[in-house]
Amino acid sequence: MSELVDRLVANGTLPAVLPLWVWQLGAMVLFGSIVVFLFVLPVAGITTWVERRIMARMQSRIGPNRTGPVGFLQWLADGVKNLLKEDIVPAAADARLFRAAPYVVIVGFVATFAAIPFSSALIIADLDIGILYVTAVTALVVVGILMAGWSSNNKWALLGGIRSAAQIVSYEIPAGLSIFPAVLLAGTLSMQGIIAAQGPAPWQWFVFDNPFAFCAFVVLFTASLAEGNRTPFDLPEAESELVAGFATEYSGMRNLLFFMAEWGNLYVIGAIATTLFLGGWQIPWALEGHPVLRHLLETLTFVVKASVVGILLPIWLRWTLPRVRVDQMMVMCWKYLVPIALVNLLGTAMWVVAFPNGLLPIRLALLALTVCAAALFVRRVIFHLRNARLGREHLSFNPLATARSPG
Amino acid sequence: MDPAAIYTRVRERFGDAIGELTGSGRTAGCTVAPARVAEVAAWLRHEPGLAFDCLSTLAGVDYPKRNVIQVVYVLYSYRARHWFTLRVDAPRDDPRVASVSGVWSAAEWHEREVFDLLGVHFDGHPDLRRLLMPEDWPGHPLRKDFVEPEEYHGIRTSRESLLKA
Amino acid sequence: MGLAGFEVEVQRQTEGGGLVTEDMTLNMGPQHPSTHGVLRFVVRADGEVMKEALPDVGYLHRSIEKIAEKVGWHGFLPYTDRVDYVAAMFCNHGWAMACEQLAGIAVPRRGEYCRVIADEMCRLHSHLLSVGSMAMDLGAFTPFTHAIREREYLNDLFEELCGARLTFHYMRIGGVGWDLPPGFGDKLAHFLDRFEPLIDEYDRLISYNKIYTERLAGVAVISPQDAIDYNLVGPNLRGSGIRYDVRRDDPYSVYPELDFEVPVGRGELGVLGDCFDRYIVRVREMRESCRILRQCLRQIPDGPVIAKVPRNFKPPAGDCYVRVESARGDMGWYVVSDGTAFPHRCKIRTGSFAAISMIPRLSRGLMLADLVAVIASLDLVAPEIDR
């Protein structure tokens, strides 16, 4: 980003009347606003639409289909509805904290986008400590949730806030430990640097580099689910126990901000996983002379990878699995994920020392293993679809139409 | 065991506290004096051949003509697969019956319900208070002479019909 | 309607160092997404661990037993649907059986078979809702929607049978209201062909899911002695290992002619009598119900479906006690007649009433999330408790 601005000032496109840092700051603010308003908010909204359609199909329903084609405008309608709702602040609540809590949460979420790359040049701030910054800023969400739970003056909200704080803070550890294998393999904390150290082909991604990195990917994914309050770790908002957990007393736009942060966070989960382990925006063609096409393809690659890992997979898990209990969640984190993450870290470190350029056969073997597992899964799905005894006549089961003869 | 045999044993053991054998089928049984019913129940439960481990139902019935409120205990034994019914007649103006919640834990809530809806006081019950009606409801609704109060905390209990002829 | 009578004794402890801690009193209020009706629990908790959960019932009390004394024998049948609207056929059956026993009326055989068919369909109906709600309460939303999908087909069948989807009023004193419609047997068989393999699908999806079983195994264990002491019935009793079913051990209607198994909990994934046992007993009972329905469809004889019962029905004075194996266990009807056209007393003893009276004892030491699992596994429905 900054090189782009430097070049534009150098060849006179942007007048040098203002100092360079002003142009850079302006470009960052402009790009940041574009990202927030044209990407983050729509992504958060469209994720809800995707979730509702996929969820419905898993549950033998259709999902939103009235507002716009295939219900695509549903999220806009929900946004408008929430804006128009009355903003209720309970009389006994701590009004200042109550009003401020959603903003803290949304800031904690949106600020991560400053360091999330879209393509090789499209990143608001290419920090040298990129991934560390992202991890640190997402922890701000804990403060917001605790504020919400406490200031609501509602025991159920408080319980939700406390559970969430315990969960997010605990799962920071395995998530952080799982980031380090990728950092070790790349040798840098910078997001663009980590992506640049990978390659476009699947066996050049860090996830298939060695078995420990593969486990680290799984641990990172699980821990990210827990940080994002997604099922099976959605205790803080367990509808059947706490109504809406820390967000019980919120209405209207403040409520929507909480849930926008949760759904938008799905993309962040995917983006981090893609950056660290799935090769980011790497594409197989150099495309030196066509920067627009190149950046477009890179962005497309990145967004698709981040969506599959961060949006589709968590949605699938959410509507399949039940919820863990709070003590089981803590046990899973401290007794299982942390030791496994430590082992992964040590293993990757030893691997990097032993094989500085990696072992291609191992990479190909891991990739082949994953592809085989995916193929077996797809085969099983097809088998079940064929044999689920839900033929045409069953799908449109109408008792009044299947009578053979009266009496 | 058939009810007559059970009745003989009960009568043998408790003598005057037991009345005549009445009823048929599952409700065949005898009457018991109100103050002794806990003893009789405990004996029926723990006596080896009888083993009435299940209190199948505990109901209160209001007989204004006889001026009693009758508490009916229908007992069943899972082991011996036989039935017996105890009936306790308590005077309507001050119905007091010994509680059997020490014998079967199931009786706790049933006795609370009879207290709530019929006003029978169970001596020895650990926590006798209203169950279904609000704590400050006047009267006992299942009694035959219960008159519904005109209003409760300012809410009227009857309304004009919305269908005007 | 305040907290009178619910002044829970809050304990304060002063630890070494002068830190005073106090129990938290929570109100799991009448409106709550997972209390299966209008139930209220006052929970005294030490953080997430409960010390006691006291139920407060009566929010759904509609004085149905008093209404029986006002509307007469025939007129009370629609009210019985509302005693347990999730499994309404059994309530109809219980009242009809009580009246028939008092007056010595014999129901024609075809009528009895129609009753059993309606009963077992209603058992499927109720167990589907129970199993689905339990999964939903524990966070798995999809099995609930699948259960509701199957229930919709049953609703269509019920609508064809008696015109209603929830409160059926299908049975009458002396038999049933209408004969099975033409082609009903084929449609029911078609439904069963589709439904039986789907029970296996539920097992694969949720019953043996590791997260699900971890939530349920070993939670709220009810020993067989306690189960009998508190008069638990139905799947709650069978989940504790006691193989007792009114249809098998104290049979009524045409159940002696039908062949079916009685599933019991075996403590397969935890301790005998835990939440998982009660859940899996319900899933297996659904299979047995399908079996019974197929036998009924094969064996149903021809003939009238209702006996001649006078409109001005006046059974002789006396009392009787009948039991029906409802979806929630044996439902006891103690009915007293004084020879007039109005019942003298009708007492309905339901399975959920006993189950909820056990909650203060079960809840000690459980976590808040477990309370939801316990309520769901005991299959409490508020209308049955309050009547």
Image (spheres, coloured by chain):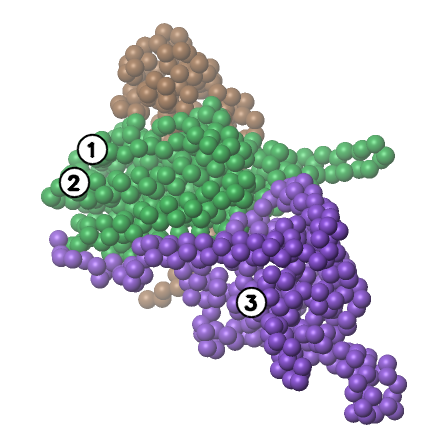
- Name the quadrant of the C terminus of chain B: bottom left
Residue type at numbered disc 3? Thr
Name the secondary structure under disc 2.
Answer: helix
Disc ID at residue C299: 2
What subunit carries mark 1? C
Front label number (3 vs 1): 3
What subunit carries mark 2? C
Image colour for chain A is purple
What subunit carries mark 3? A
Residue type at numbered disc 2? Gln
Name the secondary structure under disc 1.
Answer: helix
Q: Is residue B32 left or right of residue C298?
A: right
From the image, tell me which residue sits under label 1.
Answer: C257
Q: Position of residue C165 (x, y in %)?
A: 32, 55
Disc ID at residue A48: 3
**In front of the other: C258 or C337:** C258
Q: Position of residue C347 (x, y in %)?
A: 37, 35
Q: Earlier in the sequence, mark 2 or mark 1?
A: 1
Whether pointer 2 and pointer 1 mark residues with C-beta atoms closer than 8 Å, the reply is yes
Chain coloured brown in the rendered structure: B
